[in-house]
Image: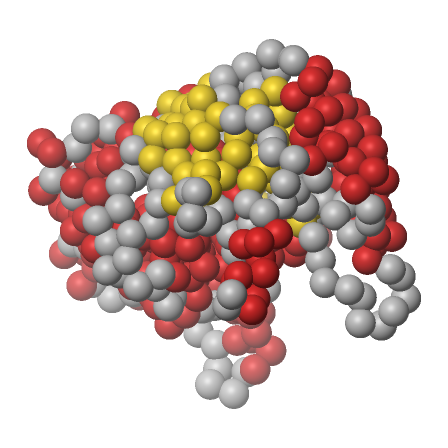
Amino acid sequence: MKPYLLFPIDVIAQGALPTNLESMSSDLELDVLFNAMAAGDRFFYTTVRQIVLAAPPEPDVIRYRQHILQDCLQLPELFRDIYRVAVEALEVQRQHYFGFMRSNPGAALTGSIHLLAAYVPLLRQIHQIMAKSASEIRSEGLKRFLAATQSELSEDYLNEIMTHVHDLELRRGATMQATIGQVGKPMHYRLLAPKPAGWRDLVPVALSRDAYSFEIAPRDDAGFQALDNMHNRGVVDVANAVAHAADHIRAFFNALRTECAFYLACLHLHHELATRELPVCFPDMYSSDQLVFSATGLYDVSLALQMDPTSRVVGNDIAADSKSLIMITGANQGGKSTFLRGTGLAQLMAQCGMFVPASSLRANIVTGLFTHYKREEDTSMNVGKFEEEVRRMSEIADQITPGNMLLCNESFASTNEREGSEIGRQVVQAMTEAGVKVVYVTHLYDLAHGFEMQGSDNVLLLRAERGDDGTHTFKLTENPPLATSFGRDLYARIFGA
């Protein structure tokens, strides 16, 4: 039995974490998101980090998770109760650990049946918890889990487990069968099921005409060792079977804990955003061979979580379907980098089955996400800033593949306008021609203007709004780049003039 709360089918292993994890985490401020979801729980943090960054590439899996998460938002106590039982099962595992005894079949059998006996009440709780909310469950995934708990964890089945546990305690001794091999040596031991106790069990064995028995002298250590060896050989197959059953239940509870942790972490985030009265939605996701990205009210969830709860973060509308390049220009401090980060975070959240920070969003799946942000000067002075930028872009080029997304923030701004624009143009053209979606924030007018002059239908030009008095609305609108960096704004901000 498996929970199947993250995937509708068996998955041998989830996707690996991205190789550019360190830079992407820093550029997108992923820790802010993960910490908000974890709410101080280290296990939650490691779980959401793995699931968000190793997202499935199929829209069907994303929708499967979305529907379960919608149930979680409506039935939070159901998921909390399931998680509580899974955590209790983990504590049971610790209390009944017997791994070091597995080389001794008799001891392993004893440890396994004690663990099974401790698991049964917890399995019964899962059955009861799910049955209690049966009429309110809507998602396919949770209905499937409900059906499994009702059919595979029925009271009859759990009672049958306890009957076997009682029998395997061998309180009346072990009855075995064996064949005689060469030189009279017993072999092919087999443990027999105990017969129900009756009046004959009250009659001494010696009174039975067909019985053969012997007694080991109290100080015959070799005899006791031989008897113990016979017992271990007789129970080894049963011990392995019971240990395997205990392992199966342990794996079930471990998976249940992990999968519920993801949805409860999403619940934490949903509560944080609801407290700030910020909108969220479940996005429409498309396959990676399409170019889809449109949103209304898209905002940077990382920024929102760091702002005062009474402050309002500004959302943006974007219509970038069929666009392989989104070029963003405009005045400094106008919201360009914030929009870029919000786009990356929304893409990651959407792809793992979460809600996203927007009023509406539709996007295609990207099979990899890369970031190329400007960095501070290398304090060791081993390389210059421009050389470091080129080196990082070269590393990205070695790893990026068609269907990926590249987020660039002021890339190649450390050199002069002409050189930076030319390098940026070549990089963008190579990436988009290779099937990579690019979102590029820049103040290099030559770079942005060059793509404007091409007049390609695959390019969307956005510009940060600026009022005549220099105020910023933090809104991006579809507009061509301007041949000014608004130096007066910088002067006024720095010198207060």
User: Residue at the spot x=65%, y=35% of the render?
Assistant: 483
Asked if one can make out residue 336 in the rendered structure from this viewpoint, the answer is yes
Quarter of the image with the N terminus is: top left
Residue 65 at what x, y percent from top left? 36, 33
User: Residue at the spot x=19%, y=28% of the render?
Assistant: 138
Q: Residue furthest bottom?
A: 219
User: Residue at the spot x=49%, y=39% of the render?
Assistant: 464
- Is 9 placed left or right of 452 in the picture? left
Depth order, front residue of 71/485: 485
Q: Identify the colour scheme used.
A: secondary structure
Depth order, front residue of 47/445: 445
Residue 300 at what x, y percent from top left? 42, 47
Give the answer, above or below, for where 14 lies relative to 167: above
- Is 422 placed left or right of 215 in the picture? right
Number of numbered discs present?
A: 0
Q: Residue furthest front?
A: 497
User: Residue at the spot x=57%, y=54% of the render?
Assistant: 488
Residue 239 at what x, y percent from top left? 47, 54
Q: Quadrant of residue 143?
A: top left
Asked if one can make out residue 111 in the rendered structure from this viewpoint, the answer is no
Depth order, front residue of 18/206: 18
Give the answer, above or below, for where 182 lies relative to 329: below
Give the answer, above or below, for where 72 lies relative to 284: below
- Is 53 placed left or right of 258 in the picture? right
Give the answer, above or below, for where 154 lies relative to 258: above
Q: Residue furthest right?
A: 382
Residue 496 at what x, y percent from top left? 50, 68
